[in-house]
Image: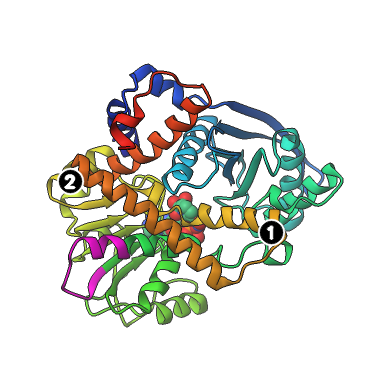
Amino acid sequence: MDNPAYKHALGEAAKRLGLTSNMLNDLFVPDQVIEKEIRLELDNGQVVNLPAWRVQHNSSRGPYKGGIRFHENVTAEEVSTLATLMTLKCAAVNIPFGGAKGGVKVNPKPLSAGELERLSRAYTKAMFGSLGSQYDIPAPDVNTNSQVMAWMMDEYNQLQGYNVPASITGKPIELGGSVGRSIATALGGKYILDYIVEQSGITKFPLMVAIQGSGNVGGGLAKLLTNDQRYRLVAISDSKSAMYSPTGVNWDKLSNHKKQHGSFSGYLEAQSIPNDELAAVECDVLVPAALENAITNENTDEIKAKIILELANHPVTAEAEAKLLEKGVQIIPDIIANAGGVTVSYFEWVQNRQGLAWDLEEVVERLKKTMVSAIAEINELKTRNKISWREATFLKSLSRLVDAMRLRGKLVQARTREYVLR
Ligand code: NAD
């Protein structure tokens, strides 16, 4: 089994910051792991007990922040890893949050709306004492959406006795959600891609782009590329198949076809190829936007792209990355490439706390500024230290975390300034 690339990058960053491996291991230990059994009454009267977690990793840079997922494979270990990566993601884009994650081990697909609502409320009740707008602010993640956030916020408010819209982000706009949240991850990723393309001095356009996954993030990016003549979508996939056309896949037409027929099958304006061949198509930019560990030792040799934009969480393994870097591929890591979502969640929290509702123009302008200044700072560190995008990103974010911990008196031996704040 391949290793996750972030572990290697964090190890390298820790060395540069003068952290011992024991100190780095300590940084992985969450501040708090809350484990509860949730009692859910099903519509048929049967009662099931479901394990549920909230892991609060680190709050040195601000309140804990992170999504809640409902999935049958959720484990305490996975929630802990994701909480750590949230701390580092918030630091990478320099928003004042720490990291957390939550999860319930459940297959939500067969649940009725009523069962899902009772589950959402029961989770909030179980975790109530550990949540709060200035302490730990949940958001949607795998299999949870704005409706789930609405139930959770309502339950939280009932227990609190008054309205606290900033207690949860990713809410429906009618309940204080931010405009722009649904496209934020894709749009943030697009700003990062534009920056990399400009910095790389590329002059031959359009760039051929292949996207693995066509949900909120992959489909969102495909739509954004349609309106930008510098890019041409040549391949895109979902969980069943992939469509390819070197002269361009028309995303509007293909997504309408899927809406009408339930799948890409029968779409005649592009070639249907097996899912696992998407990474190997002739393209300049490859965007994994679906699964973890999508690019491994197994399929690296076939990859032709020169830029990989990680919109999914940890899609490239350490072994695959080592080979790809040798070939000169630029890999833009998840904690910066897909940080647009948590950035607009932060904007939602700010608006709720101020009682304001920004318009789309303001949200988009602030998102662009946040993403571009974050990647520019990472680029400066990358160039100065002659390291990869991933190492530079983790070095930047770990140094911000270490700085905050040192200033609070939680870390005494870090030599951060020598390497990062020159
Ligand atoms: P989604 O559920 O909306 O879409 C997932 C897509 O992946 C679907 O199109 C599905 O068909 C496809 N898929 C599943 N298995 C596949 C396979 N074997 N091959 C190709 N495609 C496959 O999810 P999303 O919100 O778009 O999130 C995608 C990824 O981005 C996830 O890794 C998620 O953790 C990450 N992410 C999402 C956000 C966000 O704001 N939504 C933020 C940060 C990271």
Cα distance between the residues tagged 2 and 1: 42 Å
Judge left or right: residue 140 versus residue 304: right
| Quarter of the image where one finds residue 415 | top left
User: Which residue of the protein is positioned furthest toward the front in this rendering?
Assistant: 422
Residue 378 pos. (x, y %):
32, 47
Tell me the element at label 2.
helix
Residue at the spot 75% in from the left edge and 37% down from the top edge? 128
Q: Amino acid at mark 2?
A: Leu
Tally of marks: 2
Q: Which mark is residue 358?
A: none
Q: Amino acid at mark 1?
A: Gln
Tell me the element at label 1.
helix
Residue at the spot 71% in from the left edge and 36% down from the top edge? 127
Q: Is residue 175 magenta?
A: no
Quick one: 365 or 256, which is closer to the camera? Answer: 365
Name the residue that disc number 1 marks.
Answer: 147
Instruction: Note whether ligand 1 is within 8 Å of mark 2.
Output: no
Judge left or right: residue 69 versus residue 163: left
Residue 83 pos. (x, y %):
51, 37
| Quarter of the image where one finds residue 252 | bottom left
Residue 313 pos. (x, y %):
41, 47
Judge left or right: residue 161 versus residue 237: right
Name the residue that disc number 2 marks.
Answer: 325
Magenta highlight range: 194-208
